[in-house]
Image: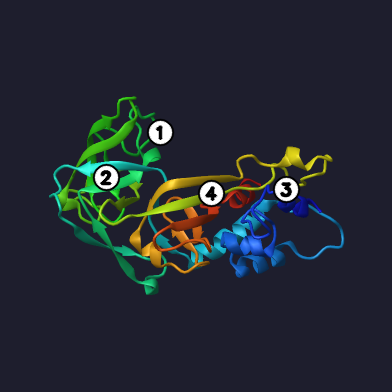
Amino acid sequence: RYLTDLVRRGIVSGWDDPRMPTLAGLRRRGVPPEAIRDFVRRIGMSKANSVVDIAMFDHAIRDRLNQVAQRRMAVLRPLKLVIENFPENHVEELEAANHPQDPAAGTRTLRFSREIFIERDDFMENPTNKFFRMAVGREVRLRYAYLITCREVVKDADGNVVELRCVYDPASRGGNAPDGRKVKATLHWVSGKDARPAEIRLYNTLFNRPDPGAGGDLDTDLNPASLEVLSGALAEPSLAEMPVGEAVQFERQGYFCPDPTSRPDALVFNRTIELRDTWVKLKVGG
């Protein structure tokens, strides 16, 4: 009854909305059938009504996707980065593993260029003590690429950071310095030469409580942040060839899958689940 009401009122897009606890919704969200079967085996059968922690289901999804999902890089909130000592109009090809735990998955080619994009959250102009990613004067590693150091911040008229000016160490190809110096952070990135624009849909739980409607008013239990749409994301070009429904891990971001509406010239990806596993932490903590 509750789900029918949500569809009728347009709170969700339909029975296959990725937030819906329906098989059609789970399929569109990218939940693999094996994860559903594993979850059912774990909780067992009971004649009594009960509430199961959603973290158990999330754990089953992550466990399966970690095994089968190839890795790619996508920047959800891009920040432009210019490598000033990298030759203009030059492109360098780098090799990246499709799955770090599965050599049989092979490799792919990344194109490294003078202009790249990193995650906006990976830069802090005035870093805190526990922030180890990019800041002015700090060296970080670009995944599969080089060590780079930020030298200058470029802002717009309103004081917003719009560009970072950096230099790279040409001897650090692959992300390791020949002199053995260490860096504390590795960032994902995409090339300004061939990154594809993408819409990323970040789905969260539809309700704020495990037993929605128990208090008599379903609307008060709805999660107002159950969907965030990012229209300015950038993705590896290889993602344009990914079939609908195939799982992929965006490195450092989570697991995603192409939406049925996705096209090579207009990519749309749905987030299946984040990388962090709260159920494992609960088990360890007792």
Give the mark, 4 or 1, whose residue is nearer the N terminus: 1
Q: Marks 2 and 3, how far apart in space?
A: 55 Å
Give the mark, 2 or 4, whose residue is nearer the N terminus: 2
Judging by the rendered image, the residue that carries numbered circle 4 is 202
Looking at the rendered structure, the secondary structure element under dot 4 is strand
The answer to whether 106 appears left or right of 6 in the picture is left
Judging by the rendered image, the residue that carries numbered circle 1 is 130
Q: Marks 4 and 1, how far apart in space?
A: 26 Å
Q: Marks 1 and 2, how far apart in space?
A: 17 Å
Q: Residues within 10 Å of mark 1 (few under 14, many from 20)?
A: few
Closer to the eye: label 3 or 4: 3
Judging by the rendered image, the residue that carries numbered circle 3 is 9
Q: Residue furthest top?
A: 158
Q: Mark 1 is on which residue type?
A: Lys
Q: Residue furthest right?
A: 47
Looking at the rendered structure, the secondary structure element under dot 2 is loop
Q: Mark 3 is on which residue type?
A: Arg
Q: Mark 2 is on which residue type?
A: Lys
Q: Give percent across and percent down for residue 61.
A: 59, 61
Q: Residues within 10 Å of mark 4 (few under 14, many from 20)?
A: some
